Amino acid sequence: MMASTIWAWIGVGFFAAGSLAFMLLGVGSAERNRHHFVTSFIITLIALCSYLSLAFHQGTLMAGQAGQFGYGRYVDWALTTPLLLMGLITLALPQIREKPALVVGIIFSDVFMIVTGIFAGLSDAGSGAKWIWYILSCGAFVALYFLIWGPMRATAVEQRAQGEELLGSTDPEERYEGASYKGETSLFYKQAGILSVLWFFYPIVFLVSAQGLNLVPLSYTSAFYTILDVSAKVGFGLLLLIGVRDIERNSKKVREEVPTDHTQNGLGSRQSVPRAQQAQ
Ligand code: RET
């Protein structure tokens, strides 16, 4: 069996296990967070199909004079990267309908990056067209980073401030909301950091692969892409879902607490006692 086929089967195994794990983790999740579990499951299910196609040697065609180009991977990315970004968007933007331009900008940059990447892959080796497509794709990638760490981070910071305020409320539902907002902002930072590091390697792998400068053999390219895809989908998803579950638990706890002196001088000085303890 070719090394690239073995890597494809390794991917199939991880994505099957990931899909199952995400499905089980979602059981009993709160309605407001269920979309994270559903989306993560869909992402690994799409990847499972994409890796099955690679394992069966399907989804490739002749591209330029260079030989085979596996477009199956790119179909996967075109579908899954917007979903991965939706995970981040919903962590940073609770009122998602208030920032439609930002959401459209993020999803468009991402899809533009993948589609221009497909054209780069389809272009003749060493042709000017290939590098023009590659540079366009990288431009969209830079725009994506800018949107995540600029306006999206700013809304996450706003959300944290709103969360702090709500945490001081005497209304349990508002405190629940406040704790969720704060937790979601912290989780946004963590997930955005992981995503930014992992995604950065994709254009580098493309560059050294047969699609780019042809510096490494196909077996290496397959290994790199498999490790990246598993990390960016199963690893990222697992951390996201565990984070969401912890936020849910913490927010419920905060809802049950009765604030005693929430009016005392501002942030950090709030104290609360669990309701059960107060009753004694
Ligand atoms: C390409 C080639 C052209 C330049 C750039 C690229 C970026 C690809 C990225 C892909 C991310 C895929 C993920 C898959 C999930 O599992 C298309 C390789 C910038 C960032 C996260």
Image (spheres, helix red, strand yellow):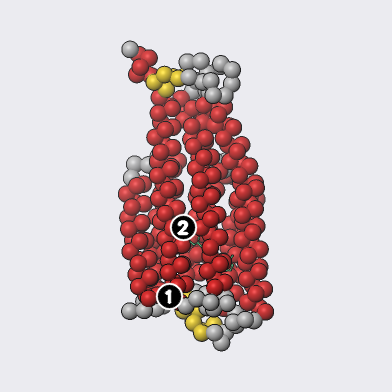
Q: Judge by depth and name the residue closer to the eye, 222 or 100.
A: 222
Element at label 2: helix
Between disc 2 and disc 1, the foreground one is 1
Q: In x, y percent, where is residue 4?
A: 40, 75
Quadrant in which ligand 1 is drawn: bottom right
Disc 2 marks a residue whose amino acid type is Ala
| Chain-order first, disc 2 or disc 1 | 1
Is the residue at mark 2 in contact range of ligand 1, meaning its CB lies under 8 Å from it? yes
Q: In x, y percent, where is residue 53?
A: 39, 73
Q: In x, y percent, where is residue 263?
A: 56, 16
Q: Judge by depth and name the residue closer to the eye, 50 or 97.
A: 50
For residue 42, say whether it is visible.
no
As drawn, the label of residue 219 is 1
Is the residue at mark 1 in contact range of ligand 1, meaning its CB lies under 8 Å from it? no
Tell me the residue that label 2 is attached to.
Answer: 232
For residue 94, say whether it is visible.
yes
Element at label 1: helix
- In the orientation shown, which residue stands out farthest toward the top? 280
- In the orientation shown, which residue stands out farthest toward the bottom? 65
